[in-house]
Amino acid sequence: MAVSFHAVPSHAPRRARSALIAVAAGVAVLSLAAHLGLPGLGEALTYLLPATLLLGVLATRRYPGERALLAALTRRPSNRRRPQAEASSGRARADATVPRGGRLIATSLAVRPPPAARACTNP
Amino acid sequence: MSAIDAPSVRSAAPRLARAAVIVTLLLLSASVLAPDVAAAHGISGRASLPVPPWLFAWAAAVVLVVSFVLLSTMWPRPRLQLLRERQICAWPPALSAPAGLVGMALFALVVYAGYEGVAYYTANFDPTFIFVIFWVGVPVSTVLVGDWFRAFSPWRSFARGVRWLGARAGLRWRAPLSYPAWLGRWPVVAGLVAFAWLELIYHDHDNPIVLASLSLAYFALMLLGMALFGIEEWSEHGDAFGGYFGLFGRLSCLDVRDRMLWLRRPLTGLASLPEEAGSVALVLVLIGITTFDGASNGVVWNTLQPHVQSVFMSLGLGETPSDELADSLGLLLAIAVVVGFYRVGVLGMRSVSARLSTRVLSQSFAHTLVPIAFAYVLAHYFSLLVWQGQAIGYLASNPLGHGTDYLGTAHWHVNYSFLGSTAIWYIQVVALVSGHVSGLALAHDRALATYRSAPEAVRSQYWMLVVMVGFTSLGLWLLSAVNT
């Protein structure tokens, strides 16, 4: 089944961009401070490396793995819906072909019974 | 086959940002490859760990990335936006009066012990009760069993008692003012910052007389607020501790409301957090306070602080005021760092879709930080709670430090072998990671409900992933620094 996504518009406001630059600059300053002799800061940067790497990738507006995630996200509900759809259509068919109760007796006794689809549905 | 019509982003990326990022990454890589001397410190000095502690932060980041992938692929529809709960049983209203009496009796004990007890902080009931049991124990228990403090709150119970007595005497009091919407939860924020300043910065913070006097002042302030704005309105918005415990109470699966005990699906209590003024600041301040507490015990702040203090001393201030001013600046700096982390996430989400303003995004995703705030509190104060919390056993028997033994427990002592440093470290790591995974789940769920398309929702959550990984790493670094 073909699935298409809407394009995500590139609406990066200037404020957001400048803030990201400020953050990157801040981390750069911290890195320099660490190497200029403030103890413990290098260790802090080691801890924060995964977050900074991720931030660096996102700051260039790249979203690694996005395509695969979206494909999986949209595939999953459609797989679930299929059995439900089949079940509901199956129930509808049974309702249409098998009149029950009083309608079954009436249909059997009638000289010219109504169409099967109408006979099985409630008025 | 899926087709994603994403815009070409390479050309749109500003050159300056790219250059700054590249420089940052190069410097960071250099930091990692050539760590300074202090990198040898860390929790490994106390806890016996098989790998360097910073590797835990990297592993936590991997856990969060995996959680992000699983959430993105296996959680296609919002599930936490509606409060799903069911009644368990009726809650007897007769319990509120004894609960209030217990709360008021404990408050009276705090005041009495403060004025009449010995002035030594380990022998007096007040410091341990206020800073360990009340400040740490109550929030932790609140997450387990719901917001029970509301029933025990001494100022609320006192005000309700006065109202009940007044009604019996034919006197009715109506609050003359309606609570202004713009004030929102700002009084709670201010109260928590003030308490944090008292605990972490004020030089005489463990003096029982000071604690008793401040407790009385707070009691009077609460009564004034409730008289002006109404008991329930002020308890909700003006009581710093009620607001703090109530916020964490939303993490609990249990809730008492409308004289019923309710059981709700985990995390759904947070989705209904009211978006009012100051609610974002409240969560960020909670994380910032814990961050400063951790940083103030670490090597970075302990190296910087004397320099800042000497600046204030050069302006003619005494040693103690300079020390307190320097630490106050540190507290503000820690809160600013936390605000900056969240701001980066919000601005990143804003860059995904211009339809939602930063203000709306900031409010909408604030509840996702509550599990993080709790994880910070639990991880940071866990050792304090399990070790120093035991002291309340003998202090309850001898609250004034005069040698009494009311409960027969005065001979108890703190058992430090109860839990080792290594076990505490692992508990802290699990608490931090669990809190952040919960935050990630809440953010993912809110994004599905907020954004119009799946690509926007997924992209926005990349930014929240950065926030969560950043907070986890920061938290683990602070914890390792505390144990240096």
Image (cartoon, coloured by chain):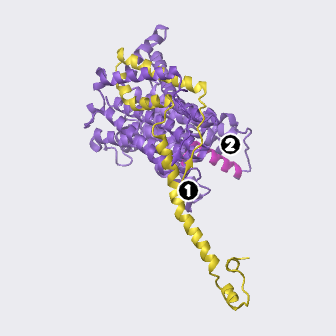
Chain colours: A yellow, B purple
Give the quarter of the image for residue B12. top right
How many other residues sit within 10 Å of disc 2, few (<14), some (14-19) or many (≥20)? many
Q: Is residue A38 left or right of residue A86?
A: left
Instruction: Give whichever of B169, B343 is nearer the camera.
Output: B343
In the rendered structure, does residue B450 fall within the stretch colored magenta? Answer: no
Q: Are marks 1 and 2 in contact (CB under 8 Å)?
A: no
Q: Image point 46% across, 12% down: which residue?
A: B318
Graded by Cα atoms within 10 Å as few (under 14), some (14 to 19) or many (20 or more), the crowding at tag 1 reads: few
Question: Which residue has dot 2 on it?
Answer: B230
Residue B250 appears anywhere in the view: yes
Closer-to-camera residue (A72/B245): A72
The three-letter code of the residue at mark 2 reads Gly
Q: Which residue is mark 1?
A: B95
Discs 1 and 2 share one subunit: yes
Question: Going by the image, does B331 lie left or right of B361?
Answer: left
Q: Position of residue B99 (x, y in %)?
A: 53, 51
Q: Secondary structure at mark 1?
A: helix
- Name the residue type under label 1: Leu
